[in-house]
């Protein structure tokens, strides 16, 4: 009962990496480039990142560095230079660029499993399909590890988020969040979570990290701490979530053993990205033990001939600009493979 | 199923909850900075009264507790021409011990021979296996291996085999180290042998009480949720009803069944009995992602020691792998939190049993409280002069034994004077399949062609479609919390724990939850 089709290149995931690869391939004249996106809207994580700064350097700087200056113009993204734009606008620009270049971007389509080395089964509201491609590009991205995977003990009361869920709840659905939050982490994404909480009207009791310092620019950290009054507790580990019916506090252990308890009704676990490698693993693609993403070489090739991996699925986690540039480079690599059919017998990791 | 139906005999029963108001608009609306309600604006009001006819017309039987045992009893009683109510303190069925167990359908091979538990587990296993097949409750007969890790344990296996035979189970097989390794190649080093119990199965512990409750309600039982029993009244003379006081008002009942699980001793004391104490025994468990499923083929049981059954590794019907439980005797019946020590202990044990397991992502860590008593057996006892039956001390085997317990309790009610009359066959129910053994909706071209909602995936990790979520929200016993929805569909239960789908799932749920219920969404236990 599956409808079977063939395409030239099948790209799984319509985030910046997948869309850039699609744009690059379609712009280079590869015939049928199809991108599968399981969400209702294409664009990936930037869809729900309402902070600015997207694309500030992507198209002006990185393209030049990687020798792909021409592509930005070709794909229509050249307009996004200057101080950068918001995530949703950036996501739309990426989708438009891929479509304008001639790629087919389909949303609400999930690649559920493999039916052959370069054949994927899909589910969508239109039914079941079996798509065979000359090359498959895995661009399934990364996700933040949730509380359970971090093995943070305590009660299971609601009020616990990752940044990804928080941003969607606030920016896409307008959900009520809570009144007082603790943010775990001090990578850039934690500061994005602070912005989202502020927008949702949630006070932030503290930002907590087990590290010795934050991982952002001094002005970003100072802005949160001094301007918005969010204390940053470094060297502090979350030992327990307290609460019945709703989170009521976070327990901490400071370096040196001192214990503390922060009252709050919301906890946001940020960062600690892991590749979303399910499809890769189901296809028997070997993983890199370090990244837990598919093991790839400098040309984005996995061990399986014709199967590439690009973007944050291969190395959680880099900013949109970096994975966009990767997508463009991967497009060139995929195109070389389509022309030559060459695949190394041993794929060497980068 | 709510609303003003005819009570009791004939028509369907009702599910009533506290604080139920007309449904809120379903559209999620455009993105906005703030949600519409504050966290405390619509706290559920447990004083929302019971429907008028529940308080005025006496029930024939009232069952206290809507866990797997209480719902099984209600379903069994629904076969007779009786007016039956279930009162449950929580806002959903199976909200206590029933939702947090090891999800095994036992053969009863290691029960205490001759005990009531041994008999009811054996009989219950047969009944539930057949009921599961009829209703579509996910079950997988994966078999169990009791793995011996030292000479002492190895020496204990023949005695366990003999015990199984005394329990009427003669299909066990002794395996040497090589045979064991052939069956479980990923087992950690040092396993010396095993006793195979081929009929041990894994089952969905969430669908089971839901199936019972659904069938009971459709057959005329009233299910009153958010309805905490606070007083059991005084013994009425003759055949007259006793008056129960609940957080939602009074109701009258001629017969009473105590299936209150962890609180069975409290309810028993309301009736003037002080014969046992429930000591909650906490079991912490870790659930590993489905990508771990291929690591293990059987339920891997430890050889029982004086300290209990020990830590097991088991596949689940959803395709996860379970590691646990701990066994900690506590005083607090609400201590369902996990602890750093407990999780570290499980990881240490898991590393020995199945070393590769620890490389996989944990999708959930939870704790359940088993209703242990000072006795080694179930405490099921009729009090004919009070027209009351105590169903206490139902431990981890309660899921397996539930249908046999229900039949046994129904018999005891008859012994107490309840006129059952002739039983009837209940209209069958078909539960949504949330197991992996049969095709799920996202894999079914026929379903998607008929309704594209079954091709619209909302929860990607667990492959849950919009159609399944919609069906759950419109079901006979609908969920009111994210957790309740997860137990019916698996939505938001996977490795991302809502990173991708959490906001979408919540919006589908809240679109259908009465306004006053909206904040209960936040309060799921």
Image (cartoon, rainbow, N blue to C red):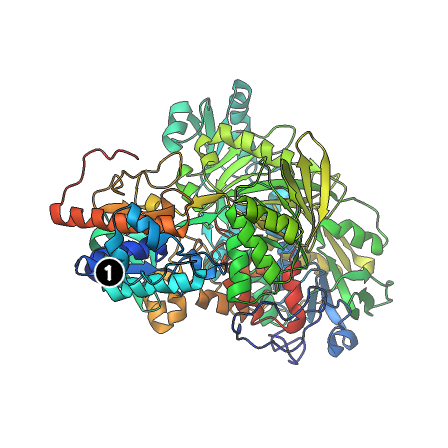
Percent position of residue A206, x then y: 66, 48
Residue located 82% across and 66% down the image: B245
Q: Chain of mark 1?
A: A
Q: Position of residue A113 (x, y in %)?
A: 32, 52
Q: Nearer the viewer, residue B496 or B370?
A: B496
Q: Is residue B338 visible?
A: no
Residue B91, image x, y percentages: 67, 62
For the residue pair A279 and A115, the one nearer the viewer reads as A279
Which quadrant is the N terminus of chain B positioned in?
bottom right
What secondary structure is found at the residue carrying circle 1? helix
Q: Quadrant of residue B448?
A: bottom left
Q: Which residue is at the front of the view, A284 or A329? A: A329
Total label count?
A: 1
Residue at numbered disc 1: A74
Crowd around label 1: few <14 · some 14–19 · many ≥20 (10 Å): some
Q: Is residue A125 left or right of residue A242?
A: left
């Amino acid at each position: 009962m599956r409808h079977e089709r063939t395409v030239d290149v099948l790209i799984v995931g319509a985030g910046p990496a997948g869309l850039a690869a699609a744009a690059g391939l379609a712009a280079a004249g590869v015939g049928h480039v199809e991108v599968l996106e399981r969400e209702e809207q294409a664009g990936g994580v930037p869809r729900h990142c309402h902070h600015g700064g997207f694309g500030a350097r992507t198209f002006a700087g990185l393209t030049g560095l990687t020798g792909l200056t021409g592509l930005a113009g070709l794909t229509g993204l050249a307009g996004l230079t200057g101080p950068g734009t918001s995530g949703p606008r950036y996501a739309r620009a990426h989708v438009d660029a891929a479509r304008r270049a001639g790629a087919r971007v389909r949303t609400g389509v999930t690649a559920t499993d493999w039916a052959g080395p370069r054949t994927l089964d899909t589910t969508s509201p239109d039914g079941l399909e079996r798509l065979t491609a000359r090359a498959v590009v895995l661009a399934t991205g990364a996700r933040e590890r949730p509380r359970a995977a971090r093995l943070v003990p305590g009660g299971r009361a609601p009020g616990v988020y990752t940044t990804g869920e928080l941003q969607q709840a606030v920016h896409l659905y307008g959900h009520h969040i809570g009144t007082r939050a603790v943010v775990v982490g001090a990578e850039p994404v934690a500061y994005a979570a602070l912005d989202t909480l502020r927008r949702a009207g949630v006070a932030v009791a503290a930002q907590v990290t087990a590290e010795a310092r934050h991982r952002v620019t001094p002005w970003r950290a100072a802005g949160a701490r001094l301007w918005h009054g969010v204390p940053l507790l470094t060297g502090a580990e979350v030992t327990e979530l307290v609460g019945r019916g709703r989170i009521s506090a976070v327990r901490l252990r400071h370096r040196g053993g001192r214990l503390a308890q922060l009252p709050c009704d919301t906890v946001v676990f940020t960062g600690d990205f892991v590749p979303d490698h399910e499809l890769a693993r189901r296809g028997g693609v070997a993983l890199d033990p370090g990244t837990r993403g598919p093991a790839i070489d400098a040309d984005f090739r996995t061990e399986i001939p014709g199967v590439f991996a690009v973007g944050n699925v291969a190395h959680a986690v880099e900013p949109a600009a970096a994975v966009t540039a990767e997508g463009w480079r991967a497009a060139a690599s995929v195109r070389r493979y389509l022309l030559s059919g060459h695949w190394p017998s041993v794929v060497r990791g980068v | 199923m709510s609303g003003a139906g005819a009570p009791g005999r004939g028509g369907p029963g009702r599910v009533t909850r506290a604080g139920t108001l007309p449904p809120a608009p379903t559209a999620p609306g455009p993105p906005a900075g703030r949600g519409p309600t504050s966290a405390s604006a619509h706290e559920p009001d447990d004083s929302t009264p019971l429907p008028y006819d529940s308080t005025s017309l006496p029930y024939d039987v009232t069952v206290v507790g809507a866990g797997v045992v209480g719902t099984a009893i209600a379903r069994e009683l629904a076969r007779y021409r009786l007016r039956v109510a279930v009162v449950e303190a929580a806002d959903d069925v199976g909200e206590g011990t029933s939702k947090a167990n090891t999800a095994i359908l036992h053969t009863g091979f290691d029960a205490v021979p001759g005990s009531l538990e041994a008999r009811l587990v054996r009989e219950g296993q047969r009944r539930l296996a057949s009921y599961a097949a009829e209703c579509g409750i996910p079950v997988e007969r994966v078999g169990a291996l009791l793995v011996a890790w030292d000479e002492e344990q190895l020496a204990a296996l023949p005695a366990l085999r003999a015990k199984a035979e005394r329990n009427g189970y003669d299909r066990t097989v002794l395996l040497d180290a090589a045979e064991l390794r052939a069956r479980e190649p990923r087992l950690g080093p040092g396993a010396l042998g095993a006793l195979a119990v081929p009929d041990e199965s894994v089952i969905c512990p969430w669908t089971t009480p839901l199936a019972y409750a659904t069938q009971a309600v459709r057959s005329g039982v009233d299910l009153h949720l958010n309805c905490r029993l606070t007083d059991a009244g005084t013994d009425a003379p003759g055949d007259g009803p006793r008056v129960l006081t609940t957080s939602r008002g009074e109701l009258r009942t001629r017969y009473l069944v105590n299936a209150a699980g962890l609180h069975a001793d409290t309810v028993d004391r309301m009736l003037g009995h002080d014969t046992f104490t429930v000591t909650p025994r906490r079991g912490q468990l870790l659930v590993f992602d489905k990508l771990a499923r291929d690591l293990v083929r059987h339920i891997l049981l430890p050889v029982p020691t004086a300290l209990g059954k020990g830590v097991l590794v088991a596949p689940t019907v959803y395709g996860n792998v379970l590691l646990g439980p701990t066994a900690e005797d506590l005083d607090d019946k609400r201590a369902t939190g996990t602890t750093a020590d407990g999780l570290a202990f499980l990881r240490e044990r898991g590393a020995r049993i199945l070393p590769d397991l620890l490389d996989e992502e944990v999708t959930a860590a939870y704790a359940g409280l088993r209703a242990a008593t000072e006795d080694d057996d179930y405490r099921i006892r009729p009090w004919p002069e009070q027209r009351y039956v105590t169903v206490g001390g139902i431990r981890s085997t309660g899921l397996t034994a539930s249908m046999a317990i229900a039949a046994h309790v129904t018999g005891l009610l008859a012994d107490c004077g309840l006129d059952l009359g002739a039983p009837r066959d209940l209209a069958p129910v078909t539960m949504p399949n949330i197991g992996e053994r049969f095709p799920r909706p996202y894999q079914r071209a026929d379903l998607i062609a008929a309704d594209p909602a079954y091709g619209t995936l909302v929860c990607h990790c667990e492959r849950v479609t919009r159609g399944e979520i919609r069906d759950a929200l419109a079901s006979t016993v609908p969920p009111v919390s994210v957790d309740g929805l997860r137990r019916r569909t698996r939505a938001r239960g996977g490795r991302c724990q809502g990173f991708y789908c959490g906001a979408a799932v919540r919006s589908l749920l809240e679109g259908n939850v009465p306004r006053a219920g909206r904040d209960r969404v936040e309060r799921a236990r």
